[in-house]
Image (cartoon, helix red, strand yellow):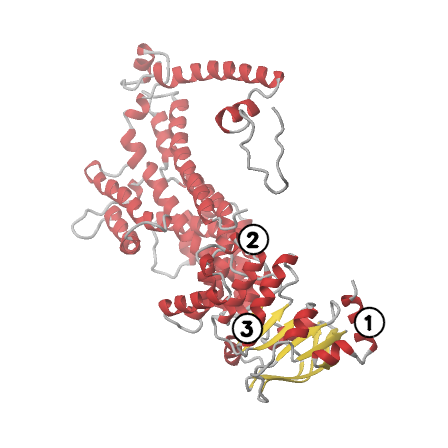
Amino acid sequence: MSTEMYKPGSYPNLPPPPGTVGFYGWIRNNLFSSISNTLLTIVSVVLVYYLIDGIIGWFLFDAVFDADSKIECRKINDGACWAVITRRVGQFVYGFYPEAERWRIDISFLTMFIAFAPLLYPDLPKRKWLLWFSGIYPFFAFILINGGFFGLAKIEYSLFGGFMLTVILGVTGIVCSLPIGILLALGRQSKLTVVRTLSVCFIEFMRGVPLITLLFVASSMLNYFMPPGTNFSILVRVIIMFTFFSAAYIAEVIRGGIQAIPKGQYEAADALGMNYWQTTRFITLPQALKISIPGIMNTFIGLYKDTTLVVVIGLLDPLGIGRAALADTKWNGLSTETYLFVALFFFVSCFAMSRYSLWLENKLNTDHK
Amino acid sequence: MVKNKNKSSKPVIEIKEMHKWFGTFHVLKNISLGVNQGERIVICGPSGSGKSTLIRCINRLEVHQKGDIIVNDVELTGDLKNLESIRSDVGMVFQSFNLFPHLTVLENCTLAPIWVKGLPKKEANELAMELLTRVKIPEQALKFPGQLSGGQQQRVAIARSLCMQPKIMLFDEPTSALDPEMIKEVLDTMIELAETGMTMLVVTHEMGFAKKVADSVIFMDEGEIIEQNDPKNFFNNPKNDRTKLFLSQILNH
């Protein structure tokens, strides 16, 4: 190519050479940039093909979706025996919640998305109206799930189980632990000695004790510490423990975010005459929470998965239901299928949370680096 | 030189025998200074001489330990109530702008008027747009600070302070963090502000600005006011040897 002559200051903006940008550019740079890279690409594609081929066969093409027992499954085909799931899917989802009342769970679950939408997506149209619903949703869901009001039959907590139990524990824990965590983080930074000491003690105690110990305390001892006459159900006690436990972690994550804010931000707020709570609300927290999103989401996902620990105090979370299924002589030995199914449920929920947090991080990024 | 017709003999800041320590380090020593309404004072001096600390004492970002500071007839003490009234009367512009990065330019300007002064949102927006027009960046109102150049950010910071309608403006090295070609736009904004009759205390090394705008130039070294004079005498025949040395260092390069 000939080099054109231009007068200084009049050199035009030229497009990059062909094949260096865009789809083909990416492929060339990343997959076929050298001979060894090309070889690696081909070997990897072949390997992935054989792996996927076997796995998909077991999962889908050779799998049995309906049968009466494991033995019958094996007679039909040699892939996965998903019948253990399809035959017991009701239990996996609702635990032992009475079949006739399961619509109450369905409605609570679906309306949960409406309640969360205005909180998770600040740009939603009619957000103010939807926020009213978010406000009453906890009571609405409690009445619906627990019953005992408006002619709804009261359902015992001991019948709760399965994914429904996971979602109740996880979502309540997450929603309650964020505000408590924020208050603890602010408390730890407070100039008031009593507030600071109490916050530090609470955080260090909760972080210093294994969650499973706290759950045993919840199941056996918590009532001794309560005023006489109060009797929280085991479910409420467990939720309190989950909330406190993850609030302590969230407090530390947010403290990191608060400390990352330059001193100049506070000086500017001070110079404008803003008081502590105005500064906290408009300057400190928006910036600290934004910085802390990955850490907060980490804690949330951790809490969500830790809900499976309730199996040790006799609550029937999905793993408990799975064990019950495996104890059935008809389905004996199908642990791979059972646990994969439970794993898939957790993966889908946690992956969604992780994607949401990425989206939020990008949305709140005003640095334009 | 900009003629100051707005200068009056009414004192708005009075500092009497004021001392400040950082721990055991004596940063400000026996400072006495009176500033009249509409007066423009430039403070210069080598780094570490206490000039920033001095103006930060005036809106109590720093707390003095001895002596008196009286701003707008209010004495600065530990009492929270008069602290807030002082801070809404005294605006401050920082070396590193300190804009709020998560808020748009407009929100930066309206936040304090709405929440501290209780201005209705519509009025606050109008006021902010008026002041952004005055600093010549109304078209950037909906952008975030991170999208602006340093000079533009500093002009937003000036507009943000002015939105509180202060009686006194403090400038803490407002052009020190800027690229050379942006210093002028900020200084021009400050000159225009001076022409409106604002009382200004400016810590800066921009001696051209001092010559043009200041009613009085103060030279500080090691926590003391060494010399105070009108710009003409200050630059042409400085009396103190340290002032002479300092001026020869910053003017001849």
Q: CA distance from mark 3 to mark 1?
A: 31 Å
Q: Secondary structure at mark 3?
A: helix
Which dot, 3 or 1, sits closer to the camera? 3
In terms of image quadrants, where is residue A259? bottom right
Ranked by sequence position, the earlier of labels 3 and 1 is 3
Disc 2 crowd rating (10 Å Cα; few below 14, some 14-19, many 20+) is: some
Q: What residue is disc 1 on?
A: B245
Q: Is mark 2 in CB contact (under 8 Å) with mark 1?
A: no
Q: Secondary structure at mark 2?
A: helix
Q: Is residue B155 above or below residue A146?
A: below
Q: Is residue A29 above or below residue B1?
A: above
Which dot, 2 or 3, sits closer to the camera? 3
The chain ID associated with circle 1 is B
Q: Secondary structure at mark 1?
A: helix
Q: Is residue A180 above or below residue A88?
A: below
Amino acid type of the residue tagged 3 in the rendering: Leu
- Residue B42 x %, y %: 66, 75
Q: CA distance from mark 2 to mark 3?
A: 40 Å
The chain ID associated with circle 3 is B
In terms of image quadrants, where is residue A164? top left
Amino acid type of the residue tagged 1 in the rendering: Leu
Front position in the image: B21 or A225 = B21
Q: What residue is disc 2 on?
A: A256
Q: CA distance from mark 2 to mark 1?
A: 46 Å
Q: What residue is disc 3 on?
A: B193
**Visible residue check, residue B100:** yes
Which residue does the image show at 55% across and 64% down from the upper left? A266
Which residue extends farthest bottom?
B9
Amino acid type of the residue tagged 2 in the rendering: Gly
